[in-house]
Image (tube, grey):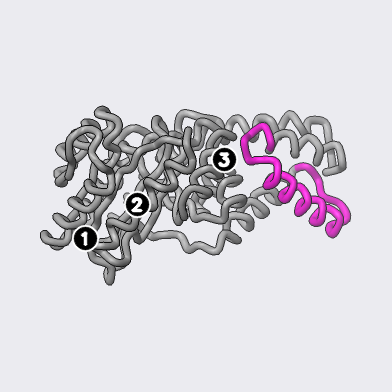
């Protein structure tokens, strides 16, 4: 129990540190918005709306939160500004919970799926390959055998980076020559993984958005070819988004969800930005579970997303 508590404390400290810029920015703005006010009135709500929108929560999600707070304020005859943080916290927690997804307890995959196949999508520069490497590390640490597929064959740097991560983590990477058919790489990866009874397969894909039809066709082809080896593949389509890009991440999520069926999200680079509010908006707007969050460069700095811990950390409450 003591060991579990030690690791839980470490994870919480990492989460607190990773969200510190967002917390300081958001609550600094809120403090200024309610300065000199004794109760929550229309002006305070207008100011709070501006704070949430400028914190990259997104317009639609912000209006939803404001409407809920207005209802609370109308029900409770007198709400002072000191209670605003608690109410805001409650409503954000409620929104995240309504996503109808259960939090993962740790880096695990269904035991009945072998191999469990994850197809990773996302534009270049969001931390896609790095996240794959960190995932491989965490799965291997959990006792799983992992295979990586370098199906982003259009960028030499992507293949090289994945090879480096494979060596660092100690997992095999299946690749072909530059410009090879990505679906062929996925086929080879799954064939090797099945032959060697691997637990998890992670397939990297090209991050191009300039031609949505081309992207859709490519991802569909990769899926169809993988099914020839593992009929249920992919078990998960994981979209990687860069949290530091704020509203840009919304647009990327929109484009990729139109191009393919995205089943899970990983939001990276939250430690270097004050735009952590984007996690709330994306979770609410797309109703796709946020599964992982990136809080730093180290291999341990990818965390499973837990809604309660995220809100507790953002609002400075003890979990």
Look at the image and give the residue range highlighted in magenta. Answer: 53-81
Number of residues whose C-alpha sits closer than 10 Å to that of mark 1, classed few (under 14), some (14–19) or many (20 or more)? many
Report the predominant secondary structure element of the magenta stretch: helix
In percent of width and height, residue 153 lies at 27, 36
In percent of width and height, residue 74 lies at 86, 55
Number of residues whose C-alpha sits closer than 10 Å to that of mark 2, classed few (under 14), some (14–19) or many (20 or more)? some
Write down the quadrant of residue 131 in the picture: top left
Q: Could you tell which of marks 3 and 1 lies nearer the N-terminus?
A: 1
**How far is disc 2 from disc 1 in space, using C-alphas?**
23 Å
Q: Secondary structure at mark 1?
A: loop
Q: In this figure, which residue is indicated by the disc labeled 2? A: 221
Q: In this figure, which residue is indicated by the disc labeled 1? A: 199
Q: Secondary structure at mark 3?
A: helix
Q: Residue at x 25, y 34 (%)?
A: 179
Q: Does the magenta-highlighted stretch encompass residue 190? A: no
Along the line of sight, the residue nearer the viewer: 112 or 187: 187
Tell whether 290 sits left or right of 38: left
Q: Could you tell which of marks 2 and 1 lies nearer the N-terminus?
A: 1
**How far is disc 3 from disc 2 in space, using C-alphas?**
25 Å
Q: Are marks 2 and 1 in contact (CB under 8 Å)?
A: no
Picture disc at residue 250? 3
Q: Could you tell which of marks 3 and 2 lies nearer the N-terminus?
A: 2
**How far is disc 3 from disc 1 in space, using C-alphas?**
32 Å
Q: Does the magenta-highlighted stretch encompass residue 69? A: yes
Work out whether 107 lies above or below 212. below
| Viewer-side label of 3, 2 | 2
Tell whether 98 sits left or right of 173: right
Q: Residue at x 48, y 33 (%)?
A: 210
| Quadrant position of the N terminus in the picture | bottom left
In percent of width and height, residue 149 lies at 23, 46
Work out whether 68 lies above or below 208. below
Residue 9 showing in the rendered view? no
């Amino acid at each position: 129990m003591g060991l579990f508590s030690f690791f839980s404390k470490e994870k919480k400290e990492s989460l607190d540190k990773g969200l510190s810029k967002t917390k300081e920015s958001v609550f600094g703005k809120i403090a200024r918005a309610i300065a000199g006010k004794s109760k929550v009135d229309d002006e305070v709500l207008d100011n709070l709306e501006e704070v949430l929108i400028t914190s990259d929560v997104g317009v639609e999600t912000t209006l939803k939160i404001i409407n809920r707070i207005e209802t609370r304020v109308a029900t409770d005859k007198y709400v002072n500004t000191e209670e605003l943080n608690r109410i805001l916290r409650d409503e954000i927690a409620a929104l995240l919970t309504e996503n109808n997804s259960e939090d993962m307890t740790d880096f695990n995959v269904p035991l009945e799926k072998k191999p469990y196949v994850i197809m990773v999508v996302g534009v270049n520069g969001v931390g896609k390959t790095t996240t794959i490497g960190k995932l491989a590390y965490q799965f291997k640490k959990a006792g799983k055998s992992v295979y990586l597929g370098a199906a982003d064959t259009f960028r030499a740097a992507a293949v090289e980076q994945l090879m480096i991560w494979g060596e660092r983590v100690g997992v095999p990477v299946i690749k072909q020559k530059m410009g090879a058919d990505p679906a062929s790489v996925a086929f080879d990866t799954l064939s090797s993984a099945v032959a060697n009874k691997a637990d998890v397969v992670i397939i990297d894909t090209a991050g191009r958005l300039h031609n949505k039809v081309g992207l859709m066709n490519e991802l569909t082809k990769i899926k169809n070819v993988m099914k020839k080896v593992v009929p249920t593949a992919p078990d998960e389509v994981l979209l990687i988004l860069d949290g530091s890009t704020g509203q840009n991440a919304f647009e990327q999520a929109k484009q990729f969800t139109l191009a393919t069926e995205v089943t899970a999200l990983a939001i990276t680079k939250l430690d270097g930005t004050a735009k952590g509010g984007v996690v709330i908006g994306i979770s609410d707007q797309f109703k796709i579970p946020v599964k992982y969050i990136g809080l730093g460069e180290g291999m341990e700095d990818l965390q499973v997303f837990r809604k309660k811990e995220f809100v507790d950390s953002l609002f400075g409450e003890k979990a």
